[in-house]
Amino acid sequence: MNFNKLKKSKLFILIAIVLFLIIVPFLIWGNDITDWFMSQYWFEKNSKLASADRGIAAIVMFGLLASDIVLPIPSSLVSTCCGLFLGFFDGFIISFLGMTVSAVLGYLIGRFFSGYAKRLVGEREMLSLGRFQKQNRFWWILMLRPVPVLAEASVLLGGIGRMSFKQVALEFTIGNIAVSAVYAAIGAFIGKSESILYAFAATLIISALSMLIARKELNR
């Protein structure tokens, strides 16, 4: 199934619904949550918390990242804060673990709703989705890990299409290692005053490169 055929199929409706469910919380609460993470209060509170008890600070960061699949959490900012408050190595570990739990939950949620999706679009369309994912021409989940919204959508669709968990886990694990390392390094080595700006810049650059590669592969 190529991209032009996809746009004409019921699968396009399914993908649109998945994206809609992810985007709506960002539209409602995204700006407020992002402003909170960028506030002086957030930095001061968590800086004191990390100084007093790094374990509690790590649990807070982990919980935020793990819930990213169902809440509009700016994972790039939280991962940057992991490096800022916990140092590079510990920040990387917490960021990686949190993002990985989120991805696993996304896959499981997709598997749970796979039957509902089948009734929505039909067995034929679901088989087409399965074949498209099985071909795995360019490792969708790996390439979309840095891209907001599409990162969550890709693991959900992986579950809905009943992709092999082994393959899905391999892709999001590699992607999470790379993304977590970048953001933890920004937080740990650049510091508070500029780390958030660098995190945003890194998000834009990495996302743009991923989307450029995706577009080239789709055109093929």
Image: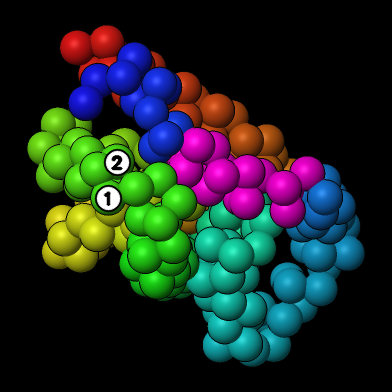
Q: Tell me the quarter of the picture where residue 108 sits.
A: bottom left
Instruction: Kindly identify the residue that appears in the image at 61 percent across and 50 percent down.
Output: 22
Q: In terms of secondary structure, where does tag 2 sit?
A: helix
Q: Which residue is found at the position 81% from the left and 64% from the top?
A: 42
Residue 98 visible in the shown view = yes
The one of 110 and 7 positioned closer to us in this rendering: 7
Q: Quadrant of residue 173?
A: bottom left
**Structural distance between the alpha carbons of marks 2 and 1:** 6 Å
Label 2: how many Cα within 10 Å (few below 14, some 14–19, many 20+):
some
Residue 147: % across, % down: 48, 38
- Residue 143 percent coordinates (x, y): 31, 37
Identify which residue, 203 or 46, lies in the foreground: 203
Q: Magenta residues?
A: 13-27
The answer to whether 47 appears left or right of 44 in the picture is: left
Say which residue label 2 marks.
125
Q: Which mark is residue 123?
A: 1
Residue 16 on the magenta span: yes
Name which residue type carries label 1: Glu
Quadrant holding the C terminus: top left
Q: Amino acid at mark 2?
A: Glu
> Residue at position x 63%, y 78% from top?
60
Which structural element holds mark 1? helix
**Residue at 68% in and 80% down:** 51
- In magenta segment, residue 133: no
- Most extreme residue toward the left is 135
Left or right of 73 in this view: 94: left
From the image, which quarter does the N terminus lie in? Answer: top left
Whether residue 183 is visible, yes or no, is no
